[in-house]
Image (cartoon, rainbow, N blue to C red):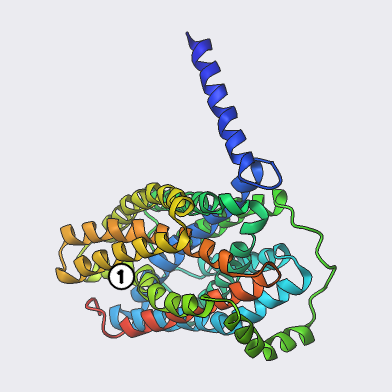
């Protein structure tokens, strides 16, 4: 009986491997898995550092009003600077036809900055400024790495499987949130040094497979030069002109600025809002965010299938409708029950946004300008990450 059950499990495993292999041009099942594990890794950072620990770390040292304000400023500075240089960063990778060296560099910088915050003395308010500077560097690098990570989607997927691969990446990424949330809960680390160190170690561990298993085309042999970076910056206006030649691209980028504004704002202020406005403890906030993440995981797989059936544009429209409903519910009544209902809708929609809009961007972008146009894509989203959190820094009801 046990042997028969084992044979069935083996067949299921083989079918799963075959399906994963069929998603990628390389025919190797490990490629989409390694790519998705990077989503797992960077979402650990996003949840542990941006959504939970860093805001509370600063609030503990400066108080709710000043803490949330300066955390918002540091976040805005890191994302805003990255937004300014995103087209340049993307154009540089287009010159060589490769993304992985840049992804490796900025990933390493994110890990180093996060670990350094964890090594600062506990409870020492004199190190608050240094902690904010380290966070600014780490978060800038995290945002920069996303440009190259998203641009590798054509390498690890076929045109017809991009929706599924993108959805798998988002879903696996949310599993990273669950893992780090459970670890924070078990260790009761909260906004302590342990949380930052765990985030740094896990980011490094699960980011490693993408650099071991994903192979890009040979490229042009181009090597980075500072002069070329400056030239790329001067050509930003040319990039915008090129984008105008692609039907619908600029409209999409403008729209992305507006719909990612609430997305980025919710990510940044979620933990502080839950503790200060709703009155939840840090442990309860962590448990709630953990539960909402489970909904996001399940929804991301579903959104990936929907993208392939009805297309990324129509899927994105449905996602944004669900977000509107969730935001209205969240803003109507500051109570735990409504917060949970809104969170389920927002968590599901968050997975849908990342699953559908990067596939939509790929459909709009010419193959030889993917990095450059993904820089504009990043610029649109990151400017909204500056305006959203800054607008709430002094007006948030928790402050």
x and y, in percent, of residue 125 in the image: 42, 78
At x 24% / y 65%, what residue is drawn? Answer: 325
Quadrant of the rendering where the C terminus is positioned:
bottom left
Residue 280: image quadrant is bottom left
Is disc 1 surrounded by few (<14), some (14 to 19) or many (20+) residues within 10 Å?
many
**Which residue is at 47% across, 75% downward?**
252
**Toward the viewer: 174 or 13?**
13
- SS class of the residue under badge 1? helix
Please tell me whether residue 160 is drawn above or below residue 240 in the rendered image: above
**Residue 74 percent location from the top left of the image:** 46, 81
Which residue is at the front of the view, 161 or 121? Answer: 161
Q: Position of residue 349 (x, y in %)?
A: 36, 60
- Left or right? Give the position of 239 relative to 351: right
- Depth order, front residue of 186/269: 269
Residue located 58% across and 37% down the image? 19
Q: For this view, does 383 lie left or right of residue 242?
A: left
Residue where numbered disc 1 is placed: 272
Identity of the residue drawn at 50% across and 61% down? 45
Residue 193 shows up from this direction: no
């Amino acid at each position: 009986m046990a042997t028969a059950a084992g044979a069935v499990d083996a067949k299921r495993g083989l079918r799963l491997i075959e399906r994963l292999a069929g998603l990628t041009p390389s025919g190797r099942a490990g490629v989409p898995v390694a790519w998705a594990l990077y989503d797992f890794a960077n979402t650990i950072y996003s949840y542990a550092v941006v959504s939970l620990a860093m805001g509370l770390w600063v609030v503990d040292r400066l108080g709710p009003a000043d803490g949330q304000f300066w955390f918002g400023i540091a976040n805005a500075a890191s994302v805003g600077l990255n937004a300014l240089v995103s087209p340049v960063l993307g154009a540089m990778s287009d010159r060589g036809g490769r993304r992985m060296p840049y992804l490796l560099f900025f990933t390493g910088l994110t890990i180093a900055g996060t670990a350094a915050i964890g090594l600062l003395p506990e409870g020492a308010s004199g190190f608050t400024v240094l902690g904010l500077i380290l966070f600014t560097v780490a978060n800038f690098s995290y945002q920069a790495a996303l440009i190259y990570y998203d641009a590798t989607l054509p390498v690890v997927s076929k045109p017809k499987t991009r929706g599924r691969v993108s959805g798998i990446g988002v879903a696996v990424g949310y599993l990273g949130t669950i893992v780090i949330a459970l670890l924070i809960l078990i260790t009761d680390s909260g906004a302590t040094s342990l949380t930052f160190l765990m985030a740094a170690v896990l980011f490094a561990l699960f980011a490693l497979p993408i650099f071991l298993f994903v192979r890009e085309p040979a490229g042009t042999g181009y090597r980075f030069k500072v002069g070329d970076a400056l030239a790329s910056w001067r050509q930003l206006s040319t990039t915008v002109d090129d984008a105008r030649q692609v039907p619908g691209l600029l409209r999409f980028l403008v729209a992305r600025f507006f719909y990612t504004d609430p997305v980025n704002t919710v990510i940044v202020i979620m933990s502080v809002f839950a503790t200060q406005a709703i009155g939840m403890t840090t442990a309860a906030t962590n448990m709630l965010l953990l539960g909402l993440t489970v909904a996001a995981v399940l929804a991301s797989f579903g959104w990936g299938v929907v993208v392939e059936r009805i297309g990324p544009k129509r899927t994105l429209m449905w996602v944004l409708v669900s977000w509107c409903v969730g935001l209205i519910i969240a803003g109507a009544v500051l109570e735990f029950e409504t917060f949970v209902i809104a969170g389920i809708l927002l968590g599901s929609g968050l997975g849908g946004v990342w699953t559908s809009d990067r596939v939509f961007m790929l459909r709009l972008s010419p193959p030889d300008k993917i990095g450059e146009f993904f820089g504009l894509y990043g610029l649109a989203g990151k400017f909204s990450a500056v305006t959203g959190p800054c607008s709430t820094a002094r007006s948030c009801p928790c402050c």
